[in-house]
Amino acid sequence: MSPTGSAAEPLLAARGLRKAFGDQVVLDGLDLEVGRGECVVLIGGSGSGKSTLLRCLNLLETVDDGQILLAGEDVSDPRVDADAVRARVGIVFQAFNLFPHLSVLDNITLAPVRVHRRPRRAAEQQAREMLARVGLADKASARPDELSGGQQQRAAIARALVNDPVLLLLDEVTSALDPELVWEVLSLLRDLRTDGMTMVLATHEMSFARSVADRVCFLSGGRVLEQGPPAQLFDAPREPRTREFLSRLHLDRPEASRPPEG
Amino acid sequence: MTAGAAGSGDWQPSALQRQRLAYRRRRSNRSVGIALVSSVLIVVALVIGITATPGWPRVQETFFSPARAWSALPAVATGLWLNIRVMLVCGVLILVVGLTLAVLRTLRGPVFFPVRVAVAAYTDLFRGLPLLLVLFLLGFGVPALRLRGVPSDPLVWGGAALVLTYSAYVAEVFRAGIESVHPSQRAAARSLGLSYAQSMRFVVLPQAVRRVVPPLLNDLVSLQKDSGLIAVLGVVDAIRSAQIETATDFNFTPYVVAGLLFVVLTIPLTRLTDWVARRQGWYGGAGTGVG
């Protein structure tokens, strides 16, 4: 099912993606490639299609046209088992979307036990290790609503990681958090990056994007308008619209309220 | 509101605050007084008004005769035991059938179109039909067909009528619960690789059922009362026992006894409903799925 591609082949390749909701065309012939171990950051204004792109890559939305190749396999083919693909691609949402009726531990073991048919004892052992990794070892039996926003988001990341995904999608994972909780999630993502996790993340945290991204993609008009290493894209953007977007952001950057990263 | 709160120990209410407190106390005393006097007046007026009516002695003898109540109690209580059993058995069946119908109705995709239509037609029909009519149709109609192998016990058909009618209501309660679970919960479940059925079973239904427990208990209380309606089929339940008792002397006290027993039975369930509803906050209401 999962052909092991050559080193040169990108882990993920999106070609000519199109997605419209009614009259509104959100993705309009979008191309994107993500290599193994690469961290790609998507930036762009509201409605530029960042979230829609991530939801399409996870097959939560069906694309209207184009192809999504995951390790060489066309996962946008309707004959593909979408559940099997989603089990290999993790996604973390802006609003955490933890299951409120389950404890943190049960949130994390749900997919391993029910989808991957792992024995419960082994799954719980693995989940506890994952919780320790995201710094929530003592919260295993807590319910999601007993956790702070930052803790909930870290639990959600642990839930996605425990499936051992080949690709992790992160959809503005810090946007619903108080400024002082943002850094705890970002430093976790930085650790994942160091461990070689392939990630595609949409974010408004430009300083974080600059420090963690291998490549930054500016989305505009339903396609990747400009992309490049963070230094180039942030400091010397070629496109006027990229410049305009970045200059607007610099006016109200919320960095003053955040502790130093690292 | 009281002086000497923690913090600044030497705080004394200002003259202004003392004035306010005194005013509030006066208002509160006055309200309590008015409520007390008006309640007593109304009760006294009702008691005098009713007992002073020319027919009161006859009404009291016919409906509220203590001696008659005592003599009717064993028979009515025996009948009530039947009501309780009917309620328990039917309650379980109704929950199972109702939940199944609700899940069937939420199935997506063109393949399930006939299933959705059938369930919708069922709920429309049985929520509209008066329970009494369903009882007559099943209780008298089906045995009259004289089919072999079909039970002719009116108790079975009375129970079946209750299950058919109540399942339609309960299915709608469950459906409302299922649809109240935010789509983002479904998306999160599917994103982990859970299938539609697994998402339903492990993520949507547990949340949906918790949310609809109070309205479900409400339906259960209602079922408890309506279990008395199977008396029309000749089953000897509490109501029927009261009717038999009444037939000998036209004293209606046994009906009142049966009614009071039903009330006594429903009160614990009603309190349970309240308790569960209050505990709902503990479950986190809409949960953490804000967006």
Image (cartoon, coloured by chain):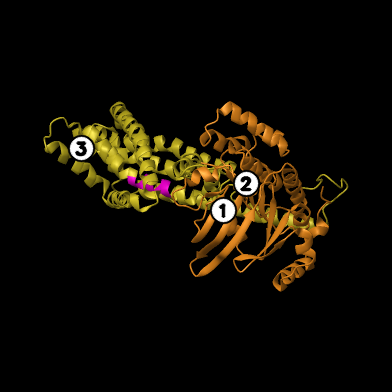
- The image quarter in which residue A4 lies: top right
Q: Which mark is residue B269?
A: none
> In the image, which lettered chain appears orange?
A
Magenta-drawn segment: B168-175
Q: Is residue B226 magenta?
A: no
Q: Secondary structure at mark 2?
A: strand
Q: Residue at horizontal 37%, vertical 41%?
A: B100
Residue toward you, B88 or A155? A155
Pointer 2 with pointer 1, Cβ within 8 A: yes
The spot of residue A12 in percent (x, y) is 60, 51
The reply to whether label 1 and label 3 mark residues of one chain is no
Residue for badge 3: B233
Q: In the rendered structure, which amino acid carries the disc numbered 3?
A: Leu
**Horizontal and vertical percent for residue A14?**
58, 57
Q: Are marks 3 and 2 in contact (CB under 8 Å)?
A: no
| Residue in the foreground of this view, choosing between A254 and A25 | A25
| Amino acid on which the number 2 mark rests in the picture | Leu
Callout 1 amino acid: Leu
The chain identifier of the residue carrying mark 1 reads A
Q: Chain of mark 2?
A: A
Q: Which residue is mark 2?
A: A167
Q: CA distance from mark 3 to mark 2?
A: 66 Å
Q: Which residue is nearer to you in this view: B226 or B147? A: B147
Q: Secondary structure at mark 1?
A: helix
